[in-house]
Image (cartoon, rainbow, N blue to C red):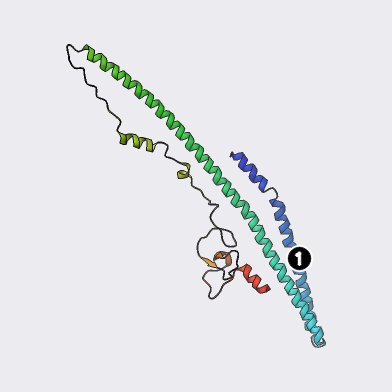
Amino acid sequence: MAAGMYLEHYLDSIENLPFELQRNFNLMRDLDQRTEDLKGQIDSLAKEYTANARTLSSEQKLSILRQIQQSYSKCKEFGDDKVQLAMQTYEMVDKHIRRLDTDLARFEADLKEKQIESTDYDSTSSKGKKGDSRQKEKKAAKTRSKVKSSDEDGSPKSAQKKVKLLQPGEFNSTSSNFGNVHPSDVLDMPVDPNEPTYCLCHQVSYGEMIGCDNTECSIEWFHFACVGLTTKPRGKWYCPRCSQDRKRK
């Protein structure tokens, strides 16, 4: 595939990316605003409770406390939704980056394969020309040998010819060295799309990793740096997603 085709297909794939990113950012901004409004309501309820604690009845106190608790729960839900939007936005951009890396690797492979084919063709042409010149030299040598033997006086025996035969070992070594270069021998792929990915970053395995103790976790393994760890924690450990699910239950 030509370079123009790779570029055209990639530009088509990211055509809607700016609009999708803008939509996610607007949603995150809206969640921030809702959270700030709820925090203002919580502050007002807390001031009302502390100012009138002595005069309020037990039912009124419980009602205010329930409202504060509900507002906090709503803020937490908005925060979780914002985290999910941020992760979705990251995965959206990372997907296009991985596709760009794959297209670059394929384009590089095509270029190397064309270079190898051109080198093989030039080598074949040069060997063919050398073979023709050697055949002409042998024919000329045979002719000179025949003329020399006819000019010798009364010699009952003709001059013996010395011919150097190509040994089978030499023929095999020549044929084995010709055309033994394959594109896979020189192709250095920077990205392996078949290698499994892990963690919230959706990257390959590297460095120290930790496994989630939730048997139903969809990701299972995480990099220390991505989950904010420097050493292995004691006891059971759950990833951020599974921890949120457990708290909701």
The picture places residue 34, in percent across and down from the top left corner, at: 76, 67
> Mark 1: which amino acid?
Gln
The picture places residue 232, in percent across and down from the top left corner, at: 52, 71
How crowded pointer 1 is (Cα within 10 Å; few <14, some 14-19, many 20+) is rated as few
- Where is residue 59, by image quadrant? bottom right
Q: Residue at x 52, y 43 (%)?
A: 109
Residue 168 vertical placement versus 147 (above, below): below
Viewport quadrant of the C terminus? bottom right
Q: Residue at x 38, y 38 (%)?
A: 176
Q: Residue at x 72, y 67 (%)?
A: 78
Q: State left or right for residue 51 relative to residue 181.
A: right
Q: Nearer the viewer, residue 243 or 22?
A: 243
Q: Which residue is most to the front?
A: 156
- Looking at the image, how many numbered discs can be counted on the residues? 1
Residue 61 vertical placement versus 191 (above, below): below
Q: Nearer the viewer, residue 82 or 163?
A: 163
Q: Residue at x 58, y 66 (%)?
A: 227
The picture places residue 207, in percent across and down from the top left corner, at: 50, 62
Residue indicated by mark 1:
33
The picture places residue 60, in percent across and down from the top left corner, at: 82, 84
Check disc 1 and report its element: helix, strand or loop.
helix
Q: Nearer the viewer, residue 171 or 208?
A: 171
Residue 79 vertical placement versus 66 (above, below): above
Q: State left or right for residue 98 relative to residue 151.
A: right
Q: State left or right for residue 227 relative to residue 248.
A: left
Viewport quadrant of the N terminus? top right
- Where is residue 5, by image quadrant? top right
- Where is residue 185, by image quadrant? top left
